[in-house]
């Protein structure tokens, strides 16, 4: 399955030098068209993929009369950590199985793992993990335990590769704030409300 890539600015999924970019072909020879930071354009390709950040796919395509070959995608990345091998593939209400299969094939052939979800802000990972990071930060504020104790407990007791606070700080409190604030605005769920330390980090960045 051949793919073409258009880039504008910095792609969080496939930054400059990523091996995936070297496998791209010209658009007129591709089965799948991938837009990384570039505006969505309808085309005849079997699948047209739009890179997402926190937003829904519908922000780019609209809600009505979306072509059956259009999908969104985001390669999970914790802040400025290197991109992971997990790609969240977003299908809209009209997305065809053929388009999903083509997109899956392109990413899997590149050695990436693909999960498919509907068009929801936060997709799967951020909707699952951001409340946990907020809870850990709030427990730290409440003096339940030190950061080291909370992170060590999660690593040893739950088998996490790193602790929730360690991971949040490495990814950036401002990044955490931005993601949580966007989810809280859409869903209104208290667990998405940014923790105090994230609010402080965002306010200090604005003032600097």
Image: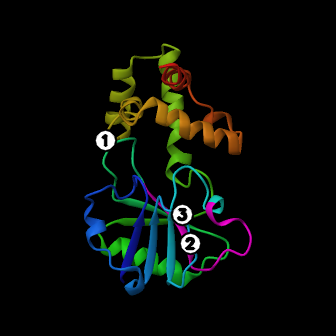
x and y percentages locating residue 112 in the rendered image: 34, 66
Name the residue rendered at 61%, 76% in the picture. Answer: 95
Q: Residue furthest right?
A: 64
Camera-side residue of 36 and 85: 36
Measured Cα–Cα span from mark 2 to mark 1: 39 Å
Camera-side residue of 188 and 21: 21
From the viewer's perspective, tell me whether residue 33 is left or right of residue 156.
Answer: right
Could one spot residue 75 in this view of the protein? yes
**Residue 61 forms part of the magenta stretch:** yes
Q: Dot 3: few (<14), some (14–19), or many (≥20) neighbours within 10 Å?
A: some
Residue 41 is tagged as 2
Asked whether the beta carbons under mark 2 and mark 3 sit within 8 Å of each other, the answer is: yes
Judging from the image, the colouring scheme is rainbow
x and y percentages locating residue 60 in the rendered image: 62, 62
Does dot 3 land on a helix, a strand or a loop? loop
Mark nearest the camera among 3 and 1 is: 3
Above or below residue 113? Residue 47 is: below
Residue 161 is tagged as 1
């Amino acid at each position: 399955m051949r793919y073409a890539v258009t880039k504008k600015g910095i792609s969080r999924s496939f930054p400059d030098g990523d091996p995936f970019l070297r496998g791209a072909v010209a658009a007129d020879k591709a089965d799948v068209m991938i837009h990384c930071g570039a505006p969505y354009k309808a085309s005849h390709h079997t699948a047209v993929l739009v890179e997402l950040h926190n937003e829904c796919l519908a922000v780019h395509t609209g809600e009505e009369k979306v072509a059956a070959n259009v999908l969104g995608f985001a390669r999970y990345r914790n802040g400025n950590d290197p991109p992971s091998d997990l790609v969240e593939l977003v299908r809209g209400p009209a997305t065809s199985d053929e388009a999903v299969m083509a997109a899956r094939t392109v990413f899997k052939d590149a050695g990436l793992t693909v999960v498919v979800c509907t068009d929801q802000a936060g997709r799967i990972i951020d909707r699952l993990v951001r409340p946990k990071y907020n809870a850990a930060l709030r427990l730290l504020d409440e003096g339940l335990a030190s950061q080291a104790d909370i992170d060590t407990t999660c690593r040893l007791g739950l088998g996490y590769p790193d602790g929730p606070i360690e991971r949040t700080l490495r990814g950036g409190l401002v990044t955490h704030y931005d993601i949580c604030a966007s989810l809280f605005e859409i869903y209104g769920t208290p667990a998405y409300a940014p923790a105090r330390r994230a609010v402080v980090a965002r306010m200090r960045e604005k003032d600097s």
